[in-house]
Amino acid sequence: MYRQILESIQGIEIYPVMSFVIFMIVFVLISYKAFRMKSSSVEELSYLPLEDNHGNIKK
Amino acid sequence: MAMETFSYDNKIVRNFAFATAIYGVVGMAVGLLVALQIFEPAANLGSQYTTFGRIRPLHTNAVIFAFVGNGIFMGVYYSLQRLCKARMFSDVLSKLHFWGWQLIIVSAVVTLPLGLTTSKEYAELEWPIDILITVVWVIFGINMIGTIMKRREKHMYVAIWFYLATFLTVAMLHVVNSLGLPVSLFKSYSVFAGVQDALVQWWYGHNAVAFFLTTPYLGLMYYFLPKAANRPVFSYRLSIIHFWALIFIYIWAGPHHLLYNALPDWAQSLGTVFSIMLIAPSWGGMLNGLLTLRGAWDRVRQDPILKFMVVAVTAYGMATFEGPLLSVKSINALTHFTDWTIAHVHVGGLGWNGFLTFGILYWLIPRIYQTQLYSVKLANAHFWIGTLGILGYAIPMYWAGLTQGLMWKQFTDEGFLQYPIFLETVLQIVPMYMFRAIGGGIYLIGAIVGVYNLVLTARQGTLLAEEQASAPALVADTEPDTAKNVYGHRWIESRPVQFLVATLIAVTIGGVIEFVPAFLIKSNVPTIESVQPYTALELSGRDIYIREGCNTCHSQQVRPFRSETERYGEYSKPGEFVYDHPFLWGSKRIGPDLARIGDKYPDAWHYNHMIDPRSMSPGSLMPPYPWLADQSIDLSIIGKKLSVMKTLGVPYSDEEVSSAADNTMAQAREISEGLAASGINVESDREIVALIAYLQRLGTDLKAQRVSDNKQYKPKPYVRRGY
């Protein structure tokens, strides 16, 4: 029943296709950007949380 | 470059940490109480205020928003200051945020047992509290973004991205899903009805899991796991892909909560496909967490903090693998409405959220109290007790879910349901319910041991309320070519505003594409001619059904399977729910589906069943509702209810609105006279009468249509509308 209702909405079949296309574009773009990062900068950024020293900790 | 000195606010972190610990124990204790009630109804303490339907939402709200919520803020306030090399933006906002959030929790603790609820899962709180949540959330956002703006570290570390996405998306979800029209100070109706309401609710419900229980905790994982392991995250590149893929895909997957329900096929498929795709970013994140420990596994053996974190990340991996599997339609057909779902969420809740929270607490409390953990042995004990608790909880629930799901679908060789009596399938799994309570109890004991250890740790140290730090000021980019030099993802990492916009776009696309067609349908849903609005009395009864949380145990959604149509009747159609503000499809069947309960039993059966369920169905685990026979229907508000419904598009006439109270009593008298004929004397203004009217209405409109199709349609003996 619902299939019929949805078929009556114009252009409904484009929605699932659109979803997938948008996702793939975003995914490929982000992956490309991520892998294009310089190794040195990646290293520097991944050490950000470890930068602050906890001088006050009695270890 | 000039060094600036400043101090980190540890007091606010301490406050949130204490709140986390306290509400953790409270929320789990309430969970244990509801777990006991499932197999021993007398555990409702004989009071309406502590009966399952009302305190099960208290449990979920307490653990999600009080325990995990405070845990998020604890971790964010600690890590954000250090990652930004800046104190929180405003101490006043920090305090307002803390006390505002505690006020919300206290409001929930008061209103939910009173039965003041919208019935929407994890969004049960009524509209004044919803507004308070919005205000406090915005305060949190301003404080967080303000801190980021005045940071002394140019780049925002991956944890901050997750915090920002959390803030933005939760705000959007909360506002859209809570849209309602107030009837009174503590009663409102959702602006959405039926299918639309269901879609919005599970877009919210699913993403509450995604953006309240997952993304902020991933942010915490990306900060605290490297901290505890004292080594950087395995792959920063992977974390970039993890972040964007996760927030982009998560938002689409909501419809997997409504598979085989009265929802468009394409939306169901979309939910399934995106759920399966979710495995990739989820496992990317999990592996990124686990591989951070590469070369440090020897430390995991000795350090209880790392043990907690490893199990947490593993539980995240298991739950995010299981979730997509449960979204496959053929698997969902078996597991939906069963305890499998309960097992699934508790692997995530107890394992991922619970263990990561405790890991962080064990790491953080000694540091801000300038001391060492009071007892590493106790922390290790907590770890093993907790792990045993998770297993003791999850295994019986998987067993129960699978057993009951199979029993519901089992046919005899002759083609009849093998277990036609729903109760049979419940009684079969009662031992599993008992084991589950034991498992949950063990986990709670572990949590209490943990809190004890943390309190003693705090007592042996002194709080370093103001932690001094220094860092060079951030020099603004004045040269135009700087931006060019930093290309790619690093560019956006140092631009919070652009980052927020990109995140907003990523999370909005999914929502928009999902909703637009769904709302186009509104004008296209074939109105089933015989589906009429509820009478005033039935609407009152429906509100009692909502107040008592009947929907926590009973679905109103017959799926299109032979095993369900045989058991309950015709499968549910979207057109049946057009006047349902809010929808009451439910998500779990502890009791049978009620979509077709109308006219199945006489009124007297319902009366006796409400007063003492075991008198009508021996062995039933439903709690008794004797107070319904003592409390009167609130006639003062019924006209307003109809008028609000009318505003929302339910076709009540002005005459029906103005004479709502009279109509209520007229129909109620008819029912009480009928009951009197069966030897039951009850005043006609009692709540039980309204509830019976509502239950007897459920599903009857569709039957009326079928008769009409056969050209034998005769109006029911009593006039439903317009007394």
Image: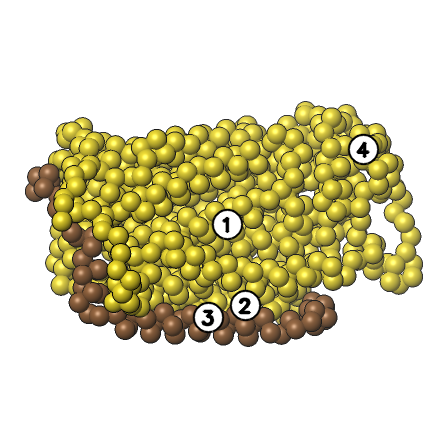
Q: Amino acid at mark 2?
A: Leu
The disc at residue B172 is 1
The disc at residue B301 is none
Q: Disc 4 sits on a residue from what chain?
A: B
Quarter containing the C terminus of chain B: top right
Residue on which disc 3 sits: A23
Percent position of residue B307, x then y: 21, 52
Q: Amino acid at mark 1?
A: Met
Q: Disc 3 sits on a residue from what chain?
A: A
Q: Disc 1 on helix, strand or loop?
A: helix
Do the numbered discs 4 and 3 sit on residues whose CB atoms are within 8 Å?
Answer: no
Q: Is residue B377 visible?
A: no
Residue on which disc 4 sits: B660
Q: Disc 2 on helix, strand or loop?
A: helix
Q: Disc 2 sits on a residue from what chain?
A: B
How far apart marks 1 and 2 lie (CA) works out to: 21 Å
Q: Amino acid at mark 4?
A: Ala
How far apart marks 2 and 3 lie (CA) works out to: 12 Å
Chain A tint in image: brown
Chain B tint in image: yellow
* Residue located at (29% from left, 62% from top): B480
